[in-house]
Image (cartoon, rainbow, N blue to C red):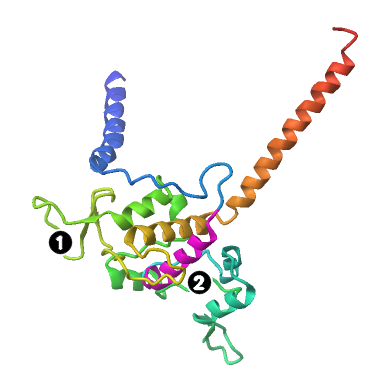
Amino acid sequence: MKKTLLSLLAVVTCAYSAPALASGGTEAPPHVHWEFSGPFGTYDRAALQRGLKIYREVCSSCHAVKHLAFRNLTDLGYNEEQVKAIAAEYTVTDGPDEDGEMFERPARPSDRFPSPYPNENAAKAANGVAPPDLSLIVKARHHGANHVFGILTGYEEAPEDHPLADGQHWNKYMPGHVIAMAKPLSNGQVTYEDGTIETVEQYAQDVAQFLAWASEPDLEARKRFGISALIFLAVFAGVMYRLKKAVWKDVH
């Protein structure tokens, strides 16, 4: 019995230590001050719109945001006509029609952003591995928006003692350092109409904030509700304390 317990302990120890060794030496992504962090933080609408531009012009060629509908873009400060115009730039598959055939049509605000690939196998065939959907990427990663920012700014030349295979790239913030995605951003790649600097770091911050919003679009409403609840509880506690004092004043 004792030997069995020791064997199980050894197996569990190896199981937990192996991932730690595999990820050892990976540099943590830089900590960015995000406007939406903290109990009173809110999204920067200008940054969200710039991040959407980065996604549409750069990221959308490989990555989907399948949980995001065009009508959600009103949260970014766009009006209904602007949302309709953005949606109309995309084509979606609809149907079947009266003849039982599927057909293509311009997207509507009620549609979700279409995937760049018809299915996962097509994505794998085009890239060697299916690029992850970005709808919830910020919530799915331990360092959240910092992870996205780090990956986009962490590309470097691989050390001489770490040769890379074809299609592999070196990223200091990627666990294991090897990533299949080529460096997607470069200075001056995307034009900002509002005069914001056009650097890789700025692009990375903007698209990371956009993806944070995509992952949690109700963040601001949740924070408002939480603050309102705390205020209510504080007032309620004060009232109850006064009531208690009034009821028990003769006892005390």
Q: Within the image, what quadrant is residue 28 found in?
A: top left
* Above or below, 31 relative to 72: above
Q: Disc 1 marks which residue?
A: 165
Q: Is residue 133 magenta?
A: no
- Front residue of 116/184: it is 184
Q: Disc 2 marks which residue?
A: 113
The image quadrant where one finds the N terminus is top left
The image quadrant where one finds the C terminus is top right
Q: Residue furthest bottom?
A: 99
Q: Residues within 10 Å of mark 2 (few under 14, many from 20)?
A: many
Q: Which residues are magenta?
A: 43-61
Query: Could you say where residue 121 lies in the image, as x and y percent from the top left?
Result: 35, 70
Q: Residue furthest left?
A: 160
Asked if the residues shown at circle 2 and circle 1 are in contact, with their CB atoms under 8 angstroms apart, the answer is: no
Q: Residue at coordinates 31% horizontally, 32% vertically from top-left?
A: 12
Residue type at the position of mark 2:
Phe
Residue type at the position of mark 1:
Ala
* Label 2, label 1: how far apart the Cα atoms are: 33 Å
From the viewer's perspective, is 165 left or right of 220?
Answer: left
- Front residue of 184/106: it is 184
- Front residue of 171/4: it is 171
* Above or below, 109 relative to 232: below
Q: Within the image, what quadrant is residue 182 found in?
A: bottom left
Q: Residue furthest top?
A: 252
Query: Could you say where residue 25 lies in the image, as x and y percent from the top left?
Result: 23, 41
* Above or below, 235 relative to 42: above
Q: Is residue 55 magenta?
A: yes
SS at mark 1 in the image: loop
Q: Residue at coordinates 43% horizontally, 60% vertically from top-left?
A: 206
Q: Residues within 10 Å of mark 1 (few under 14, many from 20)?
A: few
Majority secondary structure in the magenta region: helix
SS at mark 2 in the image: loop
